[in-house]
Amino acid sequence: MARKGPNLIVIGRGREGAPEVLFVVFDDETGSGLHPRDRTPPFGAALSGAALEAAGIGSRLLELSASDVKRGDVPELRGVNAGVVAVEAGARHDAFLERLRPAVKESGGSVVALGMYSGMSADSILTRGLADFCVVGETEAALPGLAERLISGGGGGIPPGVKWLKPDGGIGFSGQSVPVNTDDMPFLPLSVLSDGRYRKNSFPVPIGRPLKWGFVLGNRGCRFACRFCTAMTRQSLTKEYRLCSPERLFEEMKHQAERGGRTIISVEDDLFTGDREWTLRFCGLLGKSGWKTPWIMQTRFDCLDEEVLAALKRAGCVGITCGMESGSDRVLEALGKKETVARIRETGRMIKQYGFATRYTTMVGSPGETEEDVMKTAALVRELNPTVVQMSFCTPYADTELAKEAGAPGGDRRFEDPASGICALSADRLKKIRLKFYARHYFSISYLRGHAAGAVRYLIENPRIAASQNAAFASFVARQVLRTAGLRFVSRRAE
């Protein structure tokens, strides 16, 4: 089935008439309606495309949905001179790859699988004939060199971080890839942001004008090792913490604001304030420049203090995402979070005093968790009253310590499905607990009193997007609450 119009984005332009790279990604990370869904650009594809353009090779981006895959659709290659089709595939996309590869081979191209699933299951993907090559390192480090070699037909070695099926049936491997140098990363192509499909729905912040989201990625990885944390939903496929220079990140933010017309920037680093001195230098750089465009970022509660918060505020930061996970010290310890409820509460109060918009992420169904632990989480959320709270199901992703200890099977299950065997609470009970949690938080008097004015301003400034978000979320929660009427959030004895 052909994909035309806004679904196909030109990332970079190459030599006229020459083969190009078609990147295929899937918009199916989470279920709909449970909480405001963020749509983040596929950095691996976009930055690889920018690097390819520097080598004279063009690339396009095609985003498919879960319904596309279910219907059996594959990209229409007619009219797209794709020498390489690079697919950011997951375990649910095996049948798609089975249909795709013959069509690509018929046109003389090659299929490259990339992403976390490719890195974990490369041998199986190759022996089943689902792809010609698998990138097992960071996409930006390995894919550009591989695609250039395949399209040019030249010799030379395959770049590090790639596996392939040899003629004798064995698996070839070019060796471990070298992670990309953060200062050498190209800027995210503005064409990827041009149609507005990528935005941070979880930050309904009023800024006095419509939100036109920009996205930058400066630092990579994380210096912590939480037992549940996965590369499968992160912007970096390694956990090694790598800092770019403050100047490099600032230049890209300025590029997106001035040349791309972005009115707000999301810094997508997994741990933005992981290096305190770096953070203060960056904030000082923005302050001296007279920077005016608001921006948001993500970090941990224990990587913030009053001096850092004050610097962030002066530098124009308006929103902060932090992983709360739980309001129980026992659960936080079981998750390897290395944080305490006391520290979360203390920092959360400071964040609130400085007036930041907040998005706090929590989980239900963590190791050994009880309904009493969930009550503590709900109480802490109620106390800090974030702008947006997300409650996910604790998920044993295959590359995590949690999965190893739980004996969970491989794959790439998503956090919208409760996992069994992690705690004593049943999957059905976990779903009901989460729905009750959402209803009690978002429809509480304290939430409405604290956020109603901002919500009205956001609605006025972004009417179409805000109305759609609010209607979908309210409708979903209302329907589910009616279905579970009579079920209490906590036991009567506990109340």
Image (spheres, rainbow, N blue to C red):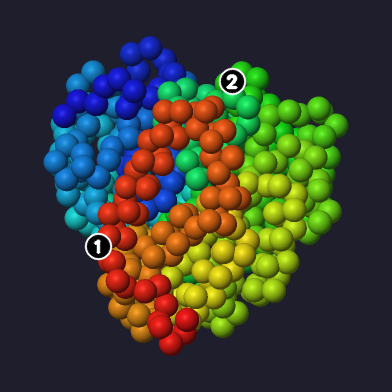
Residue position for label 1:
483
Q: Considering depth in this image, is 274 or 35 the residue closer to the camera? A: 35
Please say whether residue 149 is visible from this viewpoint: no
Rendering quarter of residue 437:
bottom left
Q: Which amino acid does label 1 sit on?
A: Arg
- Residue at the outermost top position: 16
Residue 76: percent from left, percent from top? 20, 27
Decide which of 14, 336 is in the foreground and name it: 336
Q: Residues within 10 Å of mark 2 (few under 14, many from 20)?
A: some
> Residue placed at 47% from the left, 41% from the top?
201
Does residue 492 sit above or below 185 in this rendering?
below
In percent of the image, x 68 and y 47: which residue is there? Answer: 356
What is the three-letter code of the residue carrying label 2? Answer: Gly
Provide the residue designation for mark 2: 261
| Relative to 271, residue 64 above or below | above
How busy is the neighbourhood of tag 1: few (under 14 within 10 Å), some, or many (20 plus)? few
